[in-house]
Image (cartoon, rainbow, N blue to C red):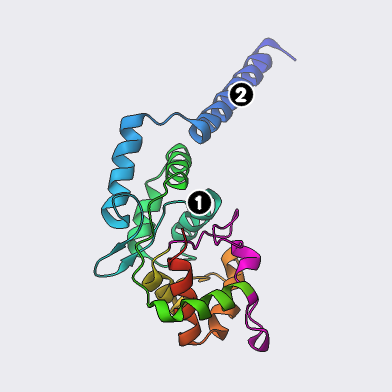
Amino acid sequence: MNLQSLTRTTAFVVAASISTMAHAQEKTGHVSAPELRAKTDYCKTCHGVEAQGFRGSFPMPRLAGQQPEYVENQLKAFIEHRRRNPVMFNVAHALSPAMLAALTDEFKNLKPKPLGGAPKAIVPEGKKIYDEGIPGANVPPCASCHGPEAKGVGQFPRLAGQLNDYVIKKLTNWDKERGQNKANPDASAIMQPIAHDLTDAQIRAVAAYVSELN
């Protein structure tokens, strides 16, 4: 190898190394406390002062205690138009990997009380469906994915403390909002047939039950 070729090769290796390092730093880069506070304050304008959810013109979901992997997957689904929400599409696009990691960690550790507000009379029915499913309708127990306390695990979201009206809206409109790219599904695809097979009354009962859980 002559000197000119060696120089070109060395330059290429150095450039590739710098690019790799930059990508790694983007993934694990530091987010300052003021930057994180500004972003969480922005999120809380819709999701509540403690990310406990908010009832306005539309129910805004609780993010407090949510599984980081689930949040990351859903933000990616917004970006890729697999899940429809024009506001969250724009929000998700603006988050760097480092900020996303910091936000999900911040929300995971918040523990506000549930807002409640669901009809108490249907909570026992919701608990039965959550724990046992509906064998006659091929609906498995919700606990089999979301955990016995509805706190979620990995890609499966926390439901405990989620606004009952938000849960109702999502399950009722599942096909219109989720799984918009059948060729590129995520873990939430498992819910499509379940949401379809639940009656409105059953959806309301399950939503009432999980909304009361801490």
Q: Is residue 209 left or right of residue 165?
A: right
Q: Residue at x 36, y 56 (%)?
A: 52
Q: Residue at x 62, y 67 (%)?
A: 143
Q: Is residue 2 above or below residue 73?
A: above
Numbered label attached to residue 72: 1
Which residue is at the front of the view, 203 or 171?
A: 203
Quadrant of residue 35 within the rendered picture: top left
For disc 2, the marked residue is 12
In three-dimensional space, the C-alpha distance between marks 2 and 1, rounded to whole angstroms, equals: 34 Å
Per the picture, the main secondary structure of the magenta-coloured stretch is loop
Q: Residue at x 42, y 39 (%)?
A: 99
Quadrant of residue 188 within the rendered picture: bottom right
Q: Residue at x 63, y 22 (%)?
A: 13
Task: Pinpoint residue 131: horizontal percent, then vertical percent.
Answer: 61, 72
The quarter in which the N terminus is drawn is top right
Task: Pinpoint residue 116: horizontal percent, then vertical percent.
Answer: 36, 66
Task: Pinpoint residue 94: horizontal percent, then vertical percent.
Answer: 37, 46
- Residue 106: in sight, yes or no? yes
- Residue 141: in sight, yes or no? no
Task: Pinpoint residue 46: horizontal percent, then vertical percent.
Answer: 29, 57
The residue segment tinted magenta is 132-161
Quadrant of residue 100 within the rendered picture: top left
- Determine if the magenta segment contains residue 204: no
Q: Is residue 91 above or below residue 138?
A: above
Q: Is residue 20 left or right of residue 97?
A: right
